Image: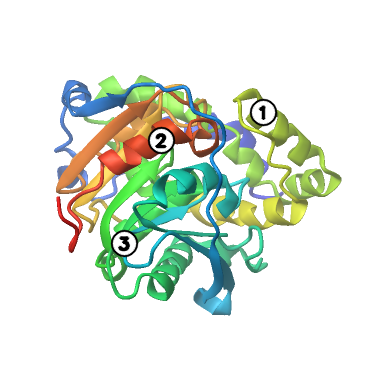
Amino acid sequence: MNRAVPLMVTWMLASVATLGMNDGVASADSAVPPADAVASATKSIAPTTDPVLLPVPASTDSWAIGGGGVRLRVHEYGHSGDPTVMLVHGYMSTARAWDQVVARLATDYHVVTYDTRGNGESDHPPGQQDYALPVLAGDIAAVIDATAAGQQVHLVGWDWGAAEGWEAAATTEIATKLLDFTAVSGLNLDLWGRWIRRTVNDPADVPAVLDQAARSAYIALWDVPVVTDLLWDSGITGAMMDGFIQFEGAPPPHVPPVDGLASLNRYRANVFARLSAPTYNRLMVPDIHVIYGSRDPYIGAAVQTRAIEGTADHLAFTEIDSGHWSPITDPQQLTAAIVAGFGPEPGRNP
């Protein structure tokens, strides 16, 4: 029997089952402040009515070479002498998902976006391990090296781009390339796994852990290779996902099956592996900013705040009045939150 079949039944019980697992770092994880401490450190960005779509500035397009020789399609905007902001997109999208954020940033920043491997114009390697988090973080480093002229960058990741950014922020040799890291509506799989285990000593978090398990129940579907692949090839999955996304207020992305299938390897290579055996409990980038949407149906506030507390020198949390697709549905509000979280920039006057 394929190992994925029981996942459909057991996923909702996985969070409870892992409570009794001992990963040997309970003392490091036990220093998380209570929930009210998280709330006191959280700020909100007032909702705005976004203006008409802004014109996206012209880009300079090039290629960067990621791990395994994978070609990554890169777009640069603004002036190369300005501080660099790198934006990493998520699942069911390409670099174009950031267009309206780019339009708001490019007057003051050198903005870099790219199609992550398995999406858009970038190469689509076939292997599951071609999408393991260390490989994806290596792609971030490759694009930084190709575009930032040796300078540190502000890294911003959304959805799976945030997951890839978390890995970069936890990897010493990549973290040195970053001024700070901003995660937008994206899970840190390792810290999520450790948060589940912490509920042994802090059962008050059990409802939040179970709530996130329910929000993430769809992930079990992505681990069923034959069925999921057929549904993508038939167009059924793409149409269903378009409907869910359109319901949230974003235009349907019409992701081609080749992109949807390739990027499923992100889930298959990483989610259950990292939840069951987290690899770190500390981030190497001192300045971390988490932006989460108050109406995000997939990722709750607790896993983006409680799970992250105590893992970096400086943590900031910002709630915005948005759903999951904020780069597209609420670019004005999101851009304001991103810029507000930036730390000092070498060479720029305050």
Whole-percent x, y for residue 77 in the image: 47, 59
> Does label 3 or label 1 sit earlier along the sequence?
3
Q: Is residue 212 above or below residue 23?
A: above
Whole-percent x, y for residue 264 in the image: 63, 51
Left or right: 258 in relation to 56 = right
Q: Nearer the viewer, residue 130 or 249?
A: 249
The answer to which image quadrant residue 185 occupies is: top left
Q: Residues within 10 Å of mark 1 (few under 14, many from 20)?
A: some
Q: Residues within 10 Å of mark 3 (few under 14, many from 20)?
A: some
Measure how far apart labels 2 and 1 are at the Cα level. Answer: 19 Å
Instruction: Note whether residue 188 is visible.
Output: yes
Q: Is residue 166 above or below residue 220?
A: below
Whole-percent x, y for residue 208 in the image: 37, 23
Q: Which residue is mark 3?
A: 82
Which numbered dot is residue 246? 1
Q: Secondary structure at mark 1?
A: helix
Question: Tell me, what colour scheme is on the image?
Answer: rainbow
Measure how far apart labels 3 and 1 are at the Cα level. Answer: 35 Å
Whole-percent x, y for residue 187 in the image: 42, 42
